[in-house]
Amino acid sequence: MEGPPGSAAAGPSYTLHPAKYSCEDILFCVDVDNESMVEMKNTGPNGRPITRLDSIKQSILLFINAKLTMNPDHRFAFAALGKTASWVRKEFSSDVNAAFSALRGFSVTPLGGHADLTQLFRIAAHEAKKSRSQNRILRVILLYCRSSVQPHFQWPANQKLFTFDVIYLHDKPGPDNCPQKVYDALVEALEHVTEYEGYIYESGQGLQRVLFRQMCLLLSHPQQRCMQDDLNLPMALTKKVPTTDSAQGEDNLRVSSQ
């Protein structure tokens, strides 16, 4: 930028060169533990209960349609997370009907126990190399639903080949769960593996609109993102009710400092 002619205070000039951003290959990994069947506060037609898994499927379709409106060359694939990750649809595609068919293929796996992200990261790293060979980038979006099971992984600290985003749906803190510890473990995983700025959002409210809003925030392209702490999103309006100091914030997880 240049100052007016003859201006002694004119700073150095600069030129902002146009840059082309890579198309994305996006791998959705959906938690299929029993807790994915927890009912949301919303209900469907005729009062039919809506589960977390139902809401996740709807939010993914919302995301895909919006993303393809921005750029029809983005592609999507699907995996499920039980005790470890496995493919649901391995072929990356821009076909919405293929995505709809893949989402119908998710089924709950009532195994319980641990959640190992290592295989998910192996799959992502392998696919990321193929994406790069086509001048594309890979992103993994994990939708996690367990309130007391901390995910774990084994992965080299210097191998960051893909972007990693997380949405965490959980119960409120209680004697039988520890969503704060789970959230901290997810933040650790994100910071350990993500190539570009990864975003993590959580909700214990059980509201579809919160999930949909968070999914829309993930529409941002990894190569165009600011730091999550710099988003400066407006606070949601809440009803003012008298609360004690001990009750304030007990249902909210700590904001990530990533």
Image (cartoon, grey):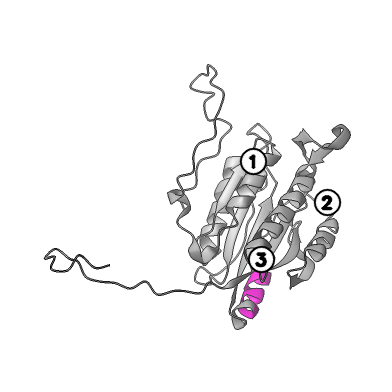
Confirm whether residue 4 shows in the render: yes
Residue beneath the point at 56% across and 51% down: 200
Q: Where residue 36 appears, x then y in whole percent?
A: 76, 46
Whether the residues at callouts 3 and 1 have beta carbons within 8 Å, the answer is: no
- Of the numbered discs in the image, which one, if any, rests on residue 20? none
Q: Where residue 147 appears, x then y in whole percent?
A: 67, 42
- Of the numbered discs in the image, which one, if any, rests on residue 26? 3
Q: Where residue 110 appears, x then y in whole percent?
A: 83, 49
| Span of residues in magenta | 119-130
Give the answer, above or below, for where 146 lies relative to 225. Answer: above
> In the image as oriented, which residue stretches furthest toward the front?
5
Mark 3 → mark 1, Cα distance in angstroms: 21 Å
Q: Mark 1: few, some, or many residues within 10 Å (few <14, many ≥20)?
A: some
- Of the numbered discs in the image, which one, if any, rests on residue 210? 1
- Residue 6: within the magenta? no
Q: Amino acid at mark 1?
A: Val
Residue beneath the point at 59% across and 32% down: 251
**In the rendered image, which quarter contains the N terminus?**
bottom left
